[in-house]
Amino acid sequence: MKGTVRSAFSLIIDDEISEHIRTCTELEASKILEKKWSLTQIKLKAFIVILYARETYEAKNLKSLYLWNKQFFPLTMSRNNFMEILHFIQFDKKNERSQRL
């Protein structure tokens, strides 16, 4: 891999893991909203980038409204999209938890 941010990121969260998170999040959102809800890989990756940036700025305890006053955050994703994904994000399928236990 070449020394890019994207290649370094893919060492942590590869395409298979990213797709799993996307699928689990879509299932959770669709269940809660009682209608089909979709999340693209691009939006999911933008969401994760914002989480990393928020931690880098040591701003995880700041209100999200403050962060979207900075130049980087609104150019990456709208605050509403970020909050919506944050509300639904899942890393497993809840209905399969008992089977795994």
Image (cartoon, rainbow, N blue to C red):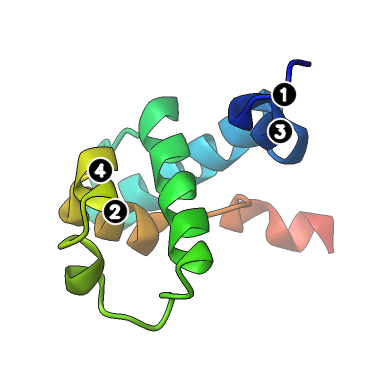
Q: Position of residue 18 (x, y in %)?
A: 60, 34
Q: Would you name the residue on which mark 2 appears?
A: 82
Q: Quadrant location of the C terminus? A: bottom right
Q: Is residue 40 visible?
A: no
Q: Is the residue under label 3 in contact with that under label 1 (CB below 8 Å)?
A: yes
Secondary element under disc 1, as helix, strand or loop, is loop
Q: Is the residue under label 1 in contact with that under label 4 (CB below 8 Å)?
A: no
**84 horizontally vs 58: left or right:** left
Sequence-first disc among 1 and 3: 1
Amino acid identity at mark 4: Met
Secondary element under disc 2, as helix, strand or loop, is helix
Sequence-first disc among 4 and 1: 1
Q: Position of residue 12 (x, y in %)?
A: 74, 41
Q: Would you name the residue on which mark 3 appears?
A: 8
Amino acid identity at mark 3: Ala
* Count of numbered tags: 4
Q: Would you name the residue on which mark 4 appears?
A: 77
